[in-house]
Image: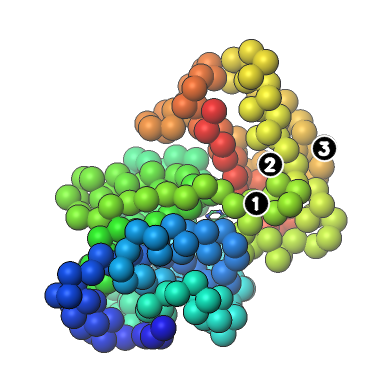
Amino acid sequence: MRLIKKVDVASRIVARVRKRGKVIGLVPTMGYLHEGHLSLVRIARKKCGYLIVSIFVNPTQFGPKEDFRQYPRDLKKDLSMLRKEGVDLVFNPSVREMYGPDHQTYVEVVDWSRLLCGASRPIHFRGVTTVVLKFFNILQPDIAVFGRKDYQQAAIIRKMVRELNLKVNVITGPVVREKDGLAMSSRNIYLNPGQRQNAVVISESLEWVRQAYKKGARQTKEVRTRMARMIRNRGGRIDYIAVVDKDTLEPVKKLKKGTLVALAVFFGRTRLIDNTVL
Ligand code: AMP
């Protein structure tokens, strides 16, 4: 497994790999890896001949008051995990390598970047699409794997790929959870023990919707109210609870098959997200 920090070196390596006719797979991450990331690495490993994982905490997707500086990092541990998964190349550029001091170019999926998480994180998705497009250009992957934990992110990247005629096959993997149901996230380590216990209410509220839907509940408003109550009772501060169509991200009044229920909740200063598709 090679660790590459320079854009031109990575580009040269992938050009050689392409010449040999290998399918190139990419799993973009911000590091501090957990089983959720590894599940994507395993999906990609099965589908490609040359597997790249990028580790880059991308400053352009963090707002000025967000946790870019505090975001957890442990490259050594990440590398040892990736070595065991048979990864061929880890791309770990510095911020300076990715963004010059006068960087001005962004790509944005305009409307969808304002919905759901975008309402409280207005520049977030612009940063995500910009860095992912840069990775696609540098690393020329045939396939790229993203997690459905970040449902909106995957949807936005798919839309960018379609609308910019990129030749990358975007694949998604299911949400990987802790034993009690909490979606795995690098940010879970910010939680103190009490918050960690209470945070399980996020996935519990989604499980509650699934059951309620099975039993015939259809009214979005009622469901959102009940979920909000459950979450507040455990000390969560709700950023949003969205009930939308999974393909258009448009709000729906009635639950049906294919409805996406997505939410973001703060426990203390830690913002956690999760979702389910009915
Ligand atoms: P991150 O390092 O948080 O930017 O995540 C990198 C990739 O891993 C993204 O495609 C995420 O959606 C995915 N991911 C993060 N957590 C999980 C999880 N619990 N289950 C599945 N995929 C995940």
Q: Which residue is mark 3?
A: 233
Q: Nearer the viewer, mark 3 or mark 1?
A: 1
**Secondary element at image label 2:** helix
* Sequence-wise first label, 3 or 2: 2
Q: Nearer the viewer, mark 3 or mark 2?
A: 2
Relative placement, left or right, of 178 versus 162 is right
**Secondary element at image label 1:** loop
Q: Which residue is mark 2?
A: 203
The amino acid beneath tag 3 is: Asn
Q: Which residue is mark 1?
A: 177
- Looking at the picture, how far across and down is residue 120, in whole percent? 53, 48
Disc 1 CB within 8 Å of nearest ligand 1 atom:
yes
* Sequence-wise first label, 3 or 1: 1
Residue at 44% from the left image edge and 40% from the top image edge? 115
Measured along the vertical axis of the image, is residue 209 above or below residue 186? above
- Looking at the picture, how far across and down is residue 140, in whole percent? 23, 67
Q: Whole-Å distance between the Cαs marked 3 and 2?
A: 14 Å
Disc 1 residue crowd, few under 14, some 14–19, many 20+, Cα 10 Å = some
- Looking at the picture, how far across and down is residue 214, in whole percent? 63, 19
